[in-house]
Image (cartoon, helix red, strand yellow):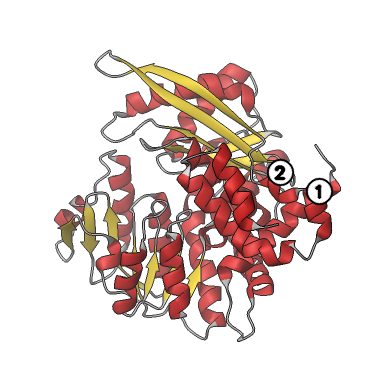
Amino acid sequence: MNVNEVMAELERKHPGESEYLQAVREVLESIEEVYNEHPEFEKAKIVERMVEPDRIFTFRVTWVDDKGEIQTNLGYRVQFNSAIGPYKGGLRFHKAVNPSMLKFLGFEQTFKNALTTLPMGGAKGGSDFDPTGKSDAEIMRFCQAFMLELWRNIGVDTDVPAGDVGVGGREIGFLNGMYQKLAREYHTGVLTGKGMTWGGSILRPEATGFGALYFVEHMLAKAGKSLKGATIALSGFGNVAWGAAKKATELGAKVIAISGPDGVVYNPNGMTDEKINYMLELRASNRNIVAPFAEKFTDATFTPGKKAWSVKCDIALPCAFQNELNEADAKELLANGTWCVAEVSNMGCTPEAIHTFQAAGILFAPGKAVNAGGVATSGLEMTQNCMHISWSGKEVDEKLHFIMESIHEACVRYGEQKDGTINYVKGANIAGFMKVAQAMLEQGVI
Ligand code: 2IT
């Protein structure tokens, strides 16, 4: 394989799909060396097959807003790869959603799911519906209209969606209610991230953030460092940022910044239970602003238009959106002494930012390893649903710990360099790739 040739061909077929091309290039650059040591992969054209989704469903979603006006959005489900199990991955509701974004996310999901140790293929879906400023009733009607189309293409053993940006427990509830009504199937397992009284798993809401901090703990331990007393800046204030803030605080770190599209909140005294709970209220308000945090808690200050990366911190955790941390941000963090960056959002850093961190020799880990605890706990939710039982919080947490430790070990196994440091990007990409490639090879040309 020659990365530039594969990329030129992909670009020819999908011109301008920048996020998708960026995600594929990052993986191919990491695996090139290993791939070329396996002539059987080359012969089976594994890379050429793996970079294209299996199929994409695109549909119109029409619904009526509170004023009685008719609204039309676009809906999608990208079923990317099913080599190691049924399609699995979240739904994103955000005004910028388009095929490029969902293809990048579905591609990433395929490798991430492979890393979890569980048998799940990769998928992603969503809509350009913007939840900002919508009422709960509008969100319900949109979710119902979305499911009116999606339901035929998903199923317990075929494709199991969950949440992502703009889709949390409330939306999963509306989606699940409509699915059951349409499909007349009352199995609990067609969506994950469900409520606790109707098939949800304890700890699924926390799992992405908790898992990320477990991963960071391992990464720091390996480098002889610790979370205790470390200052953390994280972006976002949604479900993922909430779980990360909660676990980071529990483990003795101080979360000194959260952010939103409107700016950054500097929180020099760190989090309290009340502050952490307030993050949930902020998200549920559908306003998509973080400024009210600093109105409610007077020891915090809000600066409009600034990112979390302007705050001096030991550890930076992007928890919001792709490419939310660019080269200039990376340089600002380094100048302020940051020594660890872990992506909790998918592809949170631009390639230039990653190169800047790697060149500086600081600890860096990619989203598909760091945030895999979310989908892994979705996998645990599916298992409980199939077995018709509910595990205790302790059981789920132990399994999540084990999974994050396994992912860290896989990164070390494939990413250890001659000088003893770990290239986590390479490690995660090769570990995920090897599993999916082997599964594709063994199942023939299909
Ligand atoms: O990016 C992700 O891994 C998620 N949004 C979670 C997907 C899932 O199926 O739980």
Image location (x, y in percent) of residue 40 = 84, 56
Among the two numbered marks 2 and 1 on one chain, the one whose residue lies closer to the N terminus: 1
| Disc assigned to residue 413 | none
Name the residue carrying label 1.
44
Name the residue carrying label 2.
49
**Image height of 112 relative to 169, above or below:** below
Q: What amino acid type should be assigned to the residue bearing mark 1?
A: Ala
Q: Is residue 195 visible?
A: no
Image location (x, y in percent) of residue 202 = 54, 50
Q: Is residue 344 left or right of residue 328?
A: right
Quarter of the view holding residue 82: top right
Q: Nearer the viewer, residue 6 or 196?
A: 6
Q: Is residue 196 visible?
A: yes
Query: Is there a contact, CB below 8 Å, between mark 2 and mark 1?
Result: yes
Disc 1 C-beta below 8 A from ligand 1: no
Q: Residue at x 22, y 50 (%)?
A: 262
Q: Residue at x 53, y 83 (%)?
A: 223
**Image height of 5 relative to 194, above or below:** below
Q: CA distance from mark 2 to mark 1?
A: 9 Å
Q: What amino acid type should be assigned to the residue bearing mark 2?
A: Arg
